Image (cartoon, coloured by chain):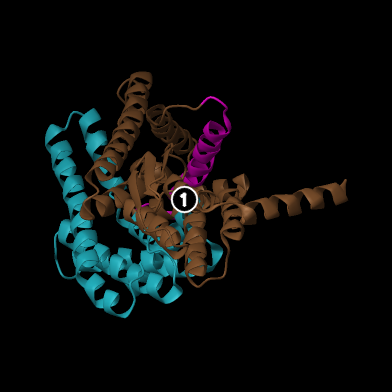
Amino acid sequence: MTETIISQFIAAGIGTIAFSVLFFVPRKYYLICGIIGGTGWLICCLCNQYLCLSIEASTFWAAAFVVICSRIGAFAKKCPVTLFLISGIFPLVPGTGIYQTIYHMIMGETDLSSLYARQTIGIAVAIVLGIIFVFEIPQKFLQKKKPEN
Amino acid sequence: MHYRLKRKVREVKIEIRGDNRMNREKEILDLAAQAGNVLLENGAEIFRVEETMNRISQYYGIKNSDFFVMSSGIFLTAEDNGGQMYAKVKHIPINAVHLDRIAAVNQLSREIEEGQHTVEEAGTHLEKIAAMKGKSDITRILFSGLGAGCFCYLSGGTLWDGLAAFAAGLLLYCFIIWTEKREKEISRIVIHITGGFLATFFSVVFFLLGFGTNLSSIVIGSIMPLLPGVSFTNSIRDLANRDYIAGSIRMIDALLVCFGIALGVGLMYILYHKATGGMPI
């Protein structure tokens, strides 16, 4: 079980780094991006499998974690939060949901298709909520010390 | 030749120093607009663009200025004490994302606030940033494949599936880079429909060649490089910051891209079905 967790973490981390290269993130931030992305994915998986949360709720917590880490990283490294946020959130973007929706639609399985469509929208909304709420709360904490980011 | 060039530069510098205030204001506002241009073009959020422009113009001492930033343009006006007005409109097309340029402009605006640059120096810096080369095409193609492979594995594929997705991701990004290189711009919708179609096509080909056992995972992995993560994230942040116009435009962009990919995948599957006579996938 531990091996699966480790290999998932590594795969998500490398995947995140790969996409941060495609978005032209400067080289010195690759490692942070990878760790944020990998841990975010891991949290999503663990919440879903072990805490028996729904996929939407797990995604929400994972997204919240990614945003908090991105903010801390941006604050520590004095660079825009977008750098870490866009790469780190990527593993959570529901590519699987989009695929399953269209696949079952083509196969004529309308029930499954609408189920996956609903799930995809749910995941997207979870990411939205995660980003919005976490950006709202600590901004006030950080702004007292320094108005940047 | 060299000497003449040097003299020319000196003359220009003297000219700038000796100019009146309005010209200086114009320069500062041009600098601010240029900084905003670079940020917006490369995928920054609206409030970051506005904030950076404000910081630059305020540091150099412009008081009455107004910026209005939308996802496809910057409008700015300023008024000096004599009541003379200065206005500028900049149209900015939606472009590929270059996060390194955003980081560089951010750093530059920090340095400006610390007083490290004059207006002219900042201008040359900004030009360098705008021309910053990213990664080479081959690196991008390789990393697209790597990302596709990793996400294939994450969506439940085996190692062989990952390899197939790696190859499909490579070929897909070759197509994307080809569309970037073309002189006539191709519509984003067309790119994503074709991209989704090609990604699925390559996946099916590798699947039929015997790489991998799980076609779904291969396709999910190989369409990953197309997904609109940037537009989606930026649109949420813009909407949260009450930049509704920019936010909704970026959201529409993200949705269109999603529909495009889905359409491409669907078309390929329909063709596949027709060709194989309803063979289960």
Q: Main secondary structure of the magenta part?
A: helix
What residue is pinned by disc 1? B29
Asked whether B125 or B16 is in front, the reply is B16
Asked whether B55 or B176 is in front, the reply is B55
Quarter of the rendering occupied by the N terminus of chain B:
top right
Q: How many marks?
A: 1
Q: Horizontal placement of B11 versus B119: left or right?
A: right
- Seen as rendered, the residue at the extreme front is B82
Q: Position of residue B97 (x, y in %)?
A: 46, 47
Quarter of the rendering occupied by the C terminus of chain B:
top left
Q: Residue at x 22, y 73 (%)?
A: A140
Residue type, mark 1 in image: Leu
Question: In which image quadrant can residue A63 be found?
Answer: bottom left
Q: Position of residue B71 (x, y in %)?
A: 34, 42
Chain for colour brown = B
Q: Is residue B41 above or below residue A31?
A: above
Chain for colour cyan = A
Asked whether A32 or B132 is in front, the reply is B132
Tell me the subunit letter for badge 1. B
Q: Position of residue B212 (x, y in %)?
A: 44, 45
Q: Is residue B103 above or below residue A105?
A: below
- Seen as rendered, the residue at the extreme bottom is A145
Residue range highlighted in magenta: B156-184
